[in-house]
Image: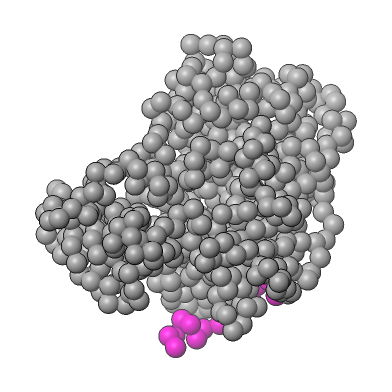
Amino acid sequence: MSTALAARVRPVALSPLPCAIEHRADGSIILRTTEPLAPHPVRLTERLEHWARATPDRTYLARRDHGGAWLRITYAATLEKVRAIGAALLKRDLSPERPIAILSGNSLEHALLGLAALHMGIPYTPVSVPYSLVSTDFGKLRHIIGLTTPGLVFADDGAQYAKAITAAVPDDVEVVCVENASNQRKMTRFDELLATHPDGADDAAARVGSDTIAKFLFTSGSTGIPKGVINTQGMWCANQQMILQAFPFLAEEPPVLLDWTPWNHTFGGNHDFGAVLYNGGTLYIDDGKPVPGAVEESVRNLREIAPTWYLNVPKGFEEVLAYLRREPALRQNFFSRAKLLFYAGAALAQHVIDAYDELAVETVGERIQWMAGFGSTETSPFCLVNRADTVVAGAIGLPAAGVEIKLAPVADKLEARVRGPHVTPGYWRAPEQTAAAFDEEGWYRFGDAMKFWDDVRPERGLAFDGRITEDFKLATGTWVSVGPLRAKLIAHLAPYMRDVVIAGLNRDYVSVLIVADMKACHSLCDFADDPLTHPATLATFREMLEAFAKISTGSSNRVRRALILRDSLDIDAGEITDKGSINQRAVLAKRAALVEALYAEPPPAHVIRL
């Protein structure tokens, strides 16, 4: 056992997640927690009112201003602003048929507008920023605006979003901005909303119930055109209570988060944002991102802010790790108050977990508890979470309080389905998609396969077993389970591979398209101009793939050929979602010529052949 693994874990209060398991005659398996879901509010801003009374001067939200200083808003000040903005919204005849669309990213104004909408019972739609600022055809933005028919659209910088607004927002829809109002159309200044007298705000808030629609969150589009997931106030509140019961430490000390994850996505916008408000904590809005050139801002913030609960996607943990290794002062601040390290969105490689453990022991003499889970936009998102003693790469845990999971036989796998008060009633204005999403008993279908992490000890929880819709058969009839194979390849080829696309439908063997890590590949060949065609890069990938083949167990997980992608993935073509995940089918369809090259005889020179 390594020194890090032998070190104690910093004490933190976590639920033991007691779970009952039922085996049905039809082969399905039901898992449900035996801990009941505790009473909870019906409206999320009830918690804002509570903390504004209990801790009026505590910082709730903070973000750096243009000069680099932290601009902070207390709970009392937040409620005051929310009531004023809410009264302004009431005058605009907004409703589920005419909701609010928020085009810009995480900001204090975005938070205040969203909270005001929640307080008044007016749905809002936070839209992925790349749909406005990266896309060139605005197709997904048009789809979302057309489906939701907003009565008000918000963008923090009117000039920056002018092109997207012109392309997608009808002329008769009011546009609100914070600064740089476009001269192409009339825009209302955000300050005008803030200046409204809060008449009627409290009466409107009192009418909001658990079935009131809180927001429309759009899926990432990894399996098709984004769908508008209805999120009710009751869903969100129930899910936050589930989180609190899984992590009782949140009630012992108000959480402090430094978070960049986008609020148009359920992880950042529901899980993280909601956990801070529900438990009276402080949220520092991080303008960094887990990519070279932007992660530096996150690191700058981590030098000053010591989070008690640090949440990130796997790529974020990987990017921050390099700085932690070389900056002792940063390490000291990062680990000083951390009680929990939480990752979501994808599997985190075990070597990254081990590296953080080693740095924590070196710095503060103890490990920090890791945690991961599983959920979706349709489930608010929190559903499954690890127990403290079963946190390993790939494990996704057991149901949270109030959650039921069904594993239903589909082909040779078990498809995961869920019931609970945190599950969406359906997709907005899409009855056929809604009907297809639920089975005959009313269980929501994840579309993901799961299996027990340990068949002998099922109480250890579940493991992800791939997406049902991604798996395919080779020409031999052998099934290829894309999710697990992809995860193993990424872990094996780290740090030189960022992601991979699996090919082989109706072919004799598996091949892959590699999304390389340019920075790591540059280091292989002394920073040559084109590292992707350099002999040293190709030789490294060939050696690593050959080593992977030696531990493969058969044709379903043995890679025979590979090709490194040279072009960036295209968000407009659906190859990559707004949260950065790859749409396997879209890539294979657009890159059909590359797939043919993988299987050509003889293969082109740039194909890595094993």
Whether 486 is drawn above or below 379: the answer is below
Residue 104 position within the rendered picture, expressed as x and y whole percent measured from the top left? 53, 32
Question: Could you say which is closer to the camera, residue 459 or residue 113?
Answer: 459
Q: Name the image quarter holding residue 247.
A: bottom right
Question: Could you say which is closer to the camera, residue 602 or residue 32?
Answer: 602
Whether 566 is drawn above or below 543: the answer is above
Question: Residue at the spot x=53%, y=63% of the render?
Answer: 411
The structure's colour scheme is one colour
Q: Is residue 9 visible?
A: no
Question: Residue at the spot x=39%, y=66% of the render?
Answer: 478
Task: Tell me which secondary structure the magenta stretch mostly adopts.
Answer: loop
Q: Quadrant of the N terminus?
A: bottom left
Q: Quadrant of the C terminus?
A: bottom left
Q: Is residue 375 visible?
A: yes
Q: Is residue 596 left or right of residue 243?
A: left
Residue 181 position within the rendered picture, expressed as x and y whole percent measured from the top left? 52, 17
Residue 154 position within the rendered picture, expressed as x and y whole percent measured from the top left? 59, 26
Question: Residue at the spot x=80%, y=41% of the render?
Answer: 211
Question: Could you say which is closer to the camera, residue 271 or residue 212?
Answer: 212
13 magenta-colored:
yes
Q: Name the image quarter holding residue 375.
A: bottom right
Furthest-bottom residue in view?
1
Q: Which residues are magenta?
A: 1-17
Question: Residue at the spot x=74%, y=48% of the render?
Answer: 235
Residue 495 position within the rendered picture, expressed as x and y whole percent measured from the top left? 31, 63
